[in-house]
Image: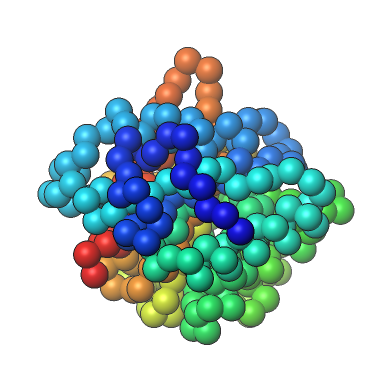
Amino acid sequence: MEFKPGEKQFIGKSCGSLEKAAFVIVPVPYERTTSYCKGTEKGPAAVIEASPQGELWDEEIKREVWEDGLFTLAPVDCTGTEEEFFARLKKYVTELMNATKAVPIFIGGEHSVTQGLFAPFEGKYKNISLLHFDAHADLRASYYGDPHSHACAVRPASLDRRVVQTGIRSVGSDEKQFINSGNVKTFLMHENRDIEKLKKDVLSALTDTVYITIDVDGFDPSVMPGTGTPQPGGFSWYDAMSLFRAVCGNKKVVGADVVEVMPLPNSPITEFNAAKLIYRLMGYIDGRK
Ligand SMILES: [Mn+2]
């Protein structure tokens, strides 16, 4: 598989090759099963378009994080049937991990892409766990007959890996049986408002190697208004940053995705904030390590 550079580079900076990169940004503009509002396929391009509006010097990290080596790839081909797409995505991620030591950060697209993104990491890292930041539990075995629905995003991962859920405030009666059973540890939003306690609990629930999946609806809609299935009462920006900083500082984070950005007409808040989130995550993970 060939890994071509994207026409636009995240935050307008590129180290020029996968070999030199500490971070690789991968757009995955997949949208097939969104059930409420539509438009997540436009998310990755909007985030990359918004990203150069941010400062290169990160005021919290206190350096220009892109200097660690940053490379943005062309979007993953999201055509074909669901089966063809997920098979292609798994192959893509597997080959990408063979081609570079860079930490990949994927931009969705609807949340179902995590099914294809996480599976190759499970193959590579035996002791990996999944930090799932989301308003929704996404644990359904299938939704409207489709096991690849966005509503089933972390169900496959939960079958054989530890899944730690935060921000959760929407659970269906058909998925509540999976909450806090088997490999799933769920921190319901309304029961876990003390961020310092939550950080400790999340760190002890995760294994040492972690993949982070961030559905932007895990944030409060005031932070991320443009998303397909919004829910009130999510994470504030600063509490979420505090959580991600703790996880990236104490665990080996080997990959991440930021999904469900749905650009709104006349409001770039969501895509800009998602771009800042991605740049900040790079700073927390620290490409100099
Ligand atoms: Mn969600």
Residue lying furthest bottom in this view?
126
The image shows residue 14 at horizontal and vertical percentages of 32, 44
Relative placement, left or right, of 100 versus 152 is: left
Q: Is residue 235 above or below residue 128?
A: above
Q: Is residue 195 above or below residue 9?
A: below
The image shows residue 135 at horizontal and vertical percentages of 54, 49
Q: 274 and 36: which one is in front? A: 274
Relative placement, left or right, of 55 versus 217 is: left
Residue 103 showing in the rendered view: yes
Coloration mode: rainbow
Quadrant placement of the C terminus = bottom left
Q: 226 and 90: which one is in front? A: 90
Q: Which residue appears at 32% of the width and 37% of the height?
A: 11
Relative placement, left or right, of 252 versus 161 is: left
Q: 157 and 62: which one is in front? A: 62
Res 230 → quadrant: top right
Q: Which residue appears at 38% of the width and 49% of the height?
A: 71
Quadrant placement of the N terminus = bottom right
How many marks are shown on the rendered structure? 0
Res 89 → quadrant: bottom right
Q: Which residue appears at 30% of the width and 28% of the height?
A: 53
Relative placement, left or right, of 146 versus 262 is: right
Q: Is residue 113 above or below residue 74?
A: below
Residue 186 showing in the rendered view: no
Residue lying furthest left in this view?
62
Residue lying furthest top in this view?
266
Q: Which residue appears at 32% of the width and 35% of the height?
A: 12
The image shows residue 144 at horizontal and vertical percentages of 84, 49
The image shows residue 13 at horizontal and vertical percentages of 30, 40
